[in-house]
Image: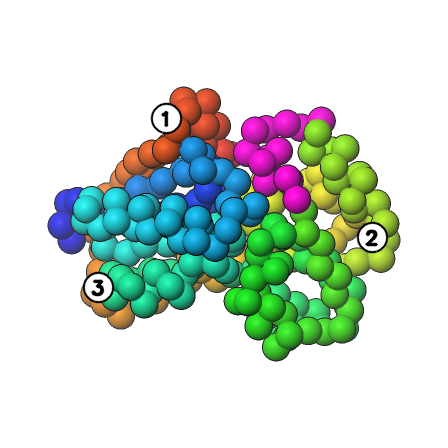
Amino acid sequence: MKQNEAIGIFDSGIGGVTVLKQLLNRLPNEKYMYYSDSKNNPYGDKSEQEINTFCENIVKFFIREKCKVIVIACNTASAKSAKWLREKYTSIPILAIEPAYKMVHDYAYHEETLVMATKATIESEKFNSLYHTYDNHKTTLLPCVGLAEMIEEGKKEKIEKYLKRYLEPYKGKVKNVVLGCTHYPLIKQEIKQILGEVRFFDGAPYLAKHLENVLKEKDLINHESIKNTIQFIDSSNDEQKKKRFFEIIKE
């Protein structure tokens, strides 16, 4: 493995740290370069053309940095831009997070389910194709406008008020919660405080497994027993985001 061949991973902010933690668990000997695009956060209220532009700039950055694979750790970017990016940049594998709705179909088909995601993800063609393919007819789609930004900012009181307002109607009714935004796993306990004991479905562990398979297939995996290194880049150079990012990594 060349010394500069890291795995590039990006999100509209630090929410993709939940994906990175799963990658670290499965692939501890890799180098990671994490790009937080907080300058353009949130992606959820941007047009598809804007999101494509943001994502393309990051992909170009990773290619210049000689990353060996790119991971989109943002559900909105995945839903809006992954297909377009793969068609345009064929020389590098581009993997993308997806809401784990198929897992509900496979393991909890007959149970009431709540999908929490950004408005852009829920309205995307990609998610709608997934949803209609695996619809258990007991699913509610909840566009959580503004929630990712509150999590990004670490506004605990605002998050609790938001969840109480929007999740209270589902208390005692839903058994499964699909976390359709990579920020949302950071507030699992807060969600449980409102909904009670629910089962969470999160796409990150499956993405980590898929990445491992891709690296093996392309002979890109690092077998050397080295301590992983994580480089953090934030588009707005926000030191507080960097501090919180590494705090979450250590949790």
Q: Which residue has dot 1 on it?
A: 237
Where residue 110 appears, x then y in whole percent? 76, 73
| Magenta span main SS | helix
Q: Residue at x 33, y 51 (%)?
A: 56
Residue under the image location 48 percent in, 55 percent down: 48
Location of residue 79 in the rendering, given as x and y in whole percent from the top left corner: 50, 60
Say whether residue 44 is left or right of residue 32.
right
The image quarter containing residue 162 is: top right
Q: Nearer the viewer, residue 190 or 64?
A: 64
Q: Which residues are magenta?
A: 145-157
Front tag of 3 and 2: 3
Q: Amino acid at mark 2?
A: Tyr
As helix, strand or loop, the secondary structure at mark 1 comes to: loop
Q: What residue is drawn where x is 22% and y is 50%?
A: 63
How far apart are the alpha carbons under marks 1 and 2? 39 Å
241 is higher (above) or lower (below) than 177: above
Q: Residue at x 67, y 28 (%)?
A: 156
Which of the two residues, 172 or 91, is positioned nearer the viewer here? Answer: 91
Q: Callout 2: 10 Å neighbours few (<14), some, many (20+)?
A: some
Q: Residue 29, percent across and down? A: 28, 48
Q: Is residue 151 magenta?
A: yes
Residue wearing tag 3: 91
> Is 190 placed left or right of 40 in the picture?
right
Looking at the image, residue 92 lies above or below residue 229: below
**Residue 131: % across, % down:** 63, 70
Q: How packed is label 1: few (under 14 Cα within 10 Å), some, or many (20 or more)? A: few
Residue 70: which disc?
Answer: none
Q: Determine which of the numbered discs, if any, sits on residue 170 in the image.
A: 2
Q: Please tell me which of labels 1 and 2 falls first in the chain.
A: 2
Q: CA distance from mark 3 to mark 2?
A: 45 Å
